[in-house]
Amino acid sequence: MLRVEGITQLFGGLTALEEVTFTVGKGSITGVIGPNGAGKTTLFNIVTGLYTPSSGRVFLDGKEITCFPPERLAPLGLVRTFQNIEMFHQMTVLENVLVGLHTRSRSGMISCALKLPWHLAEERRLHAEAMKWLEFCGIADLAELEARALPFGNCRLVEIARAMAVNPKLLLMDEPAAGLNSRETADLELLIRKIRDTGVTVVLVEHDMELVMEICDAIVVLNLGKKLAQGSPREIQENPDVIRAYLGEG
Amino acid sequence: MKRDYLLFLLFTLVVLVAPLAFEGGYLLNVLVFMGINTMLAVALNLLLGFAGQISLGHAAFFGLGAYISGVLTANHGVNPWVALPIAALSVGVIAFLLGFPILKLKGHYLAMATLGFGIIVFIVFNETVEITGGPSGLTGIPTMKIGAMEFQGEMKSYYLIWGFTLLTMLLSINLDHSRIGRALRAIHDSEVASRVMGVNARFLKVQVFTLSAVISAVAGSLYAHTMTFVSPSSFGFNFSVELVTMVIIGGLGSIFGSFLGAALLTFLPELLRVVQDYDIVVYGLLLIVMTMYMPKGLAGGVASLARLLRPAKKRTVDHAQG
């Protein structure tokens, strides 16, 4: 599904990532973990087209997507969520999700301004579709609320609904459990499984080890910009290198 | 959404009957200017309020529209109704070509680039004396005609200008409630997230910049054919700043707010005649006070006032029943 090949990222003299290579299987939930500063978010930013890697290549379904800007990746089915939730604050929850449907609607500036008939039909279809994703995330009742008025946990869900509206094949989630309480995290776990069950491949960066070990089929461990290990949760838990990286030399 | 259209309908009615209250003359003339300013403020609001991109050079698009239309009709005998679309189209092309390089810039840098453009255009108006008449202006611009009817005098100009202004407002409201309007506001709130959602932010910004410039050019053309005289001083840097002030004071992203801002800034100079040159101080103070205490502008202020009044009314009704 996703293949990352020899990704190196230099920031001035600092090597943020060095020759990182791994693959993500179709329909899996893959976790990317590692201590702070390991390069997890940098890796996400490269895959999602926000950074240009110093070297290396990224493939989606066998097609090279290195350096594709995010707006080109969305129609290909690659979408992400953000660690510091990037909401559209001035809009309602429903409108936030409607923006997610942008690539799946066609009306241009002129037909929107003139309210041409096909534009109106499209608007109705988009509203129905957006409501479907709000229901999927269990927040249909919030549809008309202003996004800025929502508590943090709900923002997270809106962001996920918005990402799902893009119709992703691959969803990258940057620390989805950050800032959530234990109940919200449990709900999130169910939601991520539900997303996977719709056929979407999920990759997540996460610090909540309990969550990662619970839901991931595969785990990639990064440390100081290098891939330390890759395997099933059990393999990772027993890997001496990983234990050393996390707990320090014994 | 329905509320916007209801408000628009109400607004249209007021605009239609307003001139009946005045027996023509000076005040009606002010209302004509208010119409042009509203059109310009709405146009700039699409860019500044919706997409969140600043332009300190919008007077230039207004001026280009006025001069292209003016020169074609006064010097080359072109029909004003032909000159208007030519002016709009040429300014559209200019804005599109300009938009690609400069909308890569953000914040202060974009402000500087548009400012530079505005100044260049202003200099061109002044220096190309053979074509534009230079600083002393361009005279003899014909008025608009439909058949035998000539749009001359305050009353006819009023309806001509406000017809176009209302159309601009309606199209902008439509745009606001569409996928394009949502995408623009998404860019404003978080450009990176909008791009992840598949919004081509770069191209959309250029598109809305172009649209905004085209509307300004139409306003310019109408201005030229109403005044029958244009001179560079109407299209300088000061007017660009005044337009930004209208949009901000009216309320970013609010179409009716743009009208309020334009209305205030059209009337204010008339009221401030007494203080003469110190009017600029009043503008400055107004902008400071508004951004501090009414960040959503007059439109936001009116909305919160309405919210305050509504429950109060409901309370009295409850009391009356109880």
Image (spheres, helix red, strand yellow):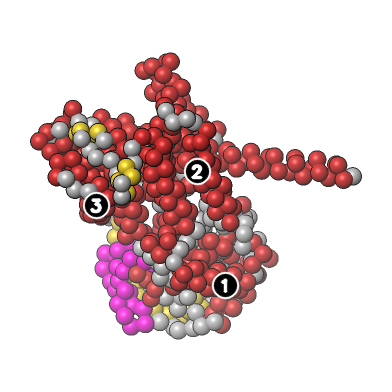
Callout 2: SS: helix
Type of amino acid at the residue the image marks with label 2: Leu
The nearer-to-camera label among 1 and 2 is: 2
Q: Residues within 10 Å of mark 3 (few under 14, many from 20)?
A: few
Q: Decide which of A147, A154 is in the foreground and name it.
A: A147
In the image, is residue A60 part of the stretch drawn in magenta?
A: yes
Residue A78 point in image, percent of width and height: 41, 73
Q: Chain of mark 3?
A: B
Location of mark 1 (residue): A128
Q: Decide which of B62, B44 is in the foreground and name it.
A: B62
Location of mark 2 (residue): B16
The nearer-to-camera label among 1 and 3 is: 3
Type of amino acid at the residue the image marks with label 3: Val
Please report the bounds of the magenta region as a residue range: A44-71
Rounded to the nearest angstrom, the CA distance separating label 1 from label 2 is 38 Å
Rounded to the nearest angstrom, the CA distance separating label 2 from label 3 is 26 Å
Callout 3: SS: helix
User: What residue is rendered at 37% in x and 39% in y?
Assistant: B157
Residue B261 point in image, percent of width and height: 46, 36
Q: Residues within 10 Å of mark 1 (few under 14, many from 20)?
A: few
Q: Chain of mark 1?
A: A
User: What residue is rendered at 29% in x and 65% in y?
Assistant: A53
Rounded to the nearest angstrom, the CA distance separating label 1 from label 3 is 44 Å
Quarter location, residue A77 = bottom left
Callout 1: SS: helix
Q: Is residue A13 visible?
A: yes
The label on residue B82 is 3
